[in-house]
Amino acid sequence: MIAIVAGGDSSEHDVSLRSAGGILSFMDKEKYNCYIVVQKGHEMYAIVGPGNAPYYQHDDEGATRIAIDYNDFSYTYNGERQTFDFAYITIHGTPGENGILQGYFDIIGVPYSTSGVLVESLTFNKFALNNFLRSFPEIHISDSVLVRRGMKRLPDEEIIKRLGLPCFVKPNAGGSSFGVTKVKTPEQLTPAIEKAMNESDEVMVERLLTGTEITCGCFRRLNGQPTTFPITEVVVKNVEFFDYEAKYEGKSDEITPARIAPKTAERVSELTRHIYELLGCYGIIRIDYILSGEVGDEQINLLEINTTPGMTPASFIPQQVRASELEIKDVLSEIIEGRLKA
C-alpha cells in the first residue's frame, strides 16, 4: 500500500493537494493501492473510499477521513489495522520539503520517495544551499544577503550598493513564489522584506540575474544512475517574473524541449546530474537555472533546487517526462521499487 502524503503547513497546502491528485492519476494501479494521506498541523489522516477502497480524488468530498496512528503510520478501518509500505511525499514546503517528515519516517522505518533529512533541510534553506554550492567553482550562483527576523541587518542602502537594483526579495524557506518581490526602487526594499517575513523567519535578498529561464528534472534510476528529463524553457507573459500567477494561472509559456543549443542542453543536463550526485539526492528533483551570455556558450546560473516539485498534469516534471522516452508511471515505480529493494 502506498501513501501519497500531501498538504503541509505552508501557503502551498492546496498546491500540494493538486500534486497528490496528479500522482494518483499517474500511478500504476495494477501494482499499487494508493491512498492520499493529508497532513496539516498535528493532524494526519487517510482519505478512504467505501469499503476501504483507494479514493482517486485530490480532495476528500464523499470519502472518509481516518486518523493516522503516528506510532507506525497506520490507520484502522472497521476494526482492521491498515499499514503502508511506502510514503510518496508531495508536500511542498514544511514539513515535507525540509527534512522534518523524512526524520519521522526514518524513525519508524517507512521508506519514502525523497532525499534524506540532511539533503532536504539543506535544499530548503536557499541561503545555506547557495553558500554550500558556491564552494564548487563549476557552479555559478548569484550573490545574496540574508535577513533574519530579530537580527540587526545591513542598512537598505548597503544592501542595494552590494546587490544593485532591481533585486529579488524572497523567503529563505518556501516555494511557489509566495512572498517574492522584484524590488525596483530603494523605497520598495523594506516592505518587500516585511512581506517575505510572512512566509519565513529568514529572507534572502538576491542580485537579479537576466537571461533565459529554464528548468531541468532528474531522478535516480533503478541502476543507481541519475537521469535527466528534457529541459523546459519558461517565458513569462505580462508579469515581472515567474510568480504564482505565471506558474498556476497561465501567465507563462512553458516550452519542452527548451529552445536552446544542443550543446547548452547537454551542459545543463550534465550539471544537473552532477549536483544530484554531489548532494546525494533521491527521487525526482528539479533545478531552475538562468542562462546568460552568448547563445550556445551561456553561463549556467543556478536559481533553486526543488526536491518535491509540482506533479499536476500541467506541472514541469510531467511535461518533461511526456517529452522523454519514459512513461511517468514507470518513473514513479522505479522510485518506489528502488527504495523498497534497498
Image (cartoon, rainbow, N blue to C red):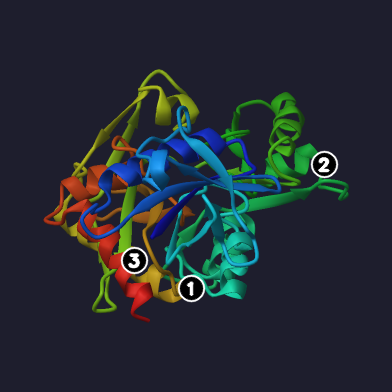
Residue designated by label 1 = 136
How far apart marks 1 and 2 lie (CA) works out to 30 Å
At 83% across and 47% down in the image, what residue appears? 153
| Label disc, if present, on residue 336 of the rendered structure | 3
Is 25 located above or below residue 85 in the figure? Answer: above
Element at label 1: loop
User: Looking at the picture, does residue 69 appear above or below residue 20?
Assistant: below
Q: Amino acid at mark 2?
A: Pro
Q: Is residue 213 visible?
A: no
For the residue marked with disc 1, what is the amino acid? Phe
Between discs 1 and 2, the one toward the N terminus: 1
Residue 14 falls left or right of residue 193: left
Which residue is denoted by mark 2 in the rendering? 155
Residue 169: % across, % down: 63, 38
Callout 3: SS: helix
Q: Position of residue 340 (x, y in %)?
A: 36, 74
SS for dot 2 = loop
Foreground tag (3 vs 1): 3
